[in-house]
Image (cartoon, helix red, strand yellow):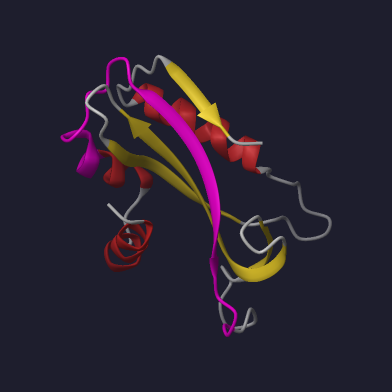
């Protein structure tokens, strides 16, 4: 499943993280799987941040500098049969000045706690630096 297919699904369905999990759990072995967290910036170079609250400036590892876009944090499940599906997601929004900062690590911990409560029993949990 391509990253674009997931993005289109999320845009079309306007689903909640648990609904994404319910959609994909039927394809996975949830006992002994590996969970992996990843973030990516969906480039939106022509979007006006004043017209779209989700379009912000984020550092992109792909580009090596800050770009305008939407930062999607995704938790993937990789099972013993080499199947990989997203099981949870968040849109990362850096805090405005004066607000409490919710970090990507905070989102990851929240997402991990959720999938554990939904019945995922991983052997390993990984993420990039």
Q: Is residue 55 above or below residue 114?
A: below
Q: As rendered, which of 119 and 29 lies closer to the eye?
A: 29
Residue 64: image quadrant is bottom right
Q: How many marks?
A: 0
Q: Residue furthest right?
A: 98
Residue 75 point in image, percent of width and height: 44, 38
Whether 41 is among the magenta residues is yes
Q: Is residue 129 above or below residue 39?
A: above
Q: Residue sitting at 22 percent across and 30 percent down?
A: 28
Whether 57 is among the magenta residues is no
Q: Residue furthest left?
A: 26
Question: Looking at the rendering, in which quadrant would you find the C terminus?
Answer: top right
Q: Residue sitting at 29 percent across and 46 percent down?
A: 20
Residue 31 point in image, percent of width and height: 27, 16
Please state if 2 lies on the left or on the right of 38 as rendered: left
Q: Is residue 24 above or below residue 70?
A: above
Q: Residue sitting at 35 percent across and 32 percent down?
A: 77
Please state if 5 lies on the left or on the right of 75 as rendered: left
Residue 91 point in image, percent of width and height: 52, 55
Q: Is residue 43 above or below residue 99?
A: below
Q: Residue sitting at 33 percent across and 21 percent down?
A: 33
Please state if 73 lies on the left or on the right of 24 as rendered: right
Give the extent of the magenta segment.
22-47
Residue 80 point in image, percent of width and height: 26, 21
């Amino acid at each position: 499943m391509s990253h674009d297919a997931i993005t289109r699904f999320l845009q079309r369905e306007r689903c909640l993280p648990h609904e994404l999990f319910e959609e994909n759990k039927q394809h996975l072995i949830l006992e002994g799987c590996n969970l992996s967290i990843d973030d990516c910036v969906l480039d939106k170079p022509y979007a006006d941040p004043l017209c779209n609250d989700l379009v912000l400036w984020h550092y992109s590892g792909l580009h090596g500098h800050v770009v305008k876009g939407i930062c999607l944090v995704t938790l993937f499940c990789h099972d013993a049969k080499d199947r990989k599906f997203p099981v949870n997601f968040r849109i990362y929004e850096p805090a405005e000045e004066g607000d409490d900062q919710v970090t990507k690590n905070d989102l990851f911990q929240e997402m991990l706690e959720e999938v554990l409560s939904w019945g995922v029993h991983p052997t390993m949990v990984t993420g990039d630096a």
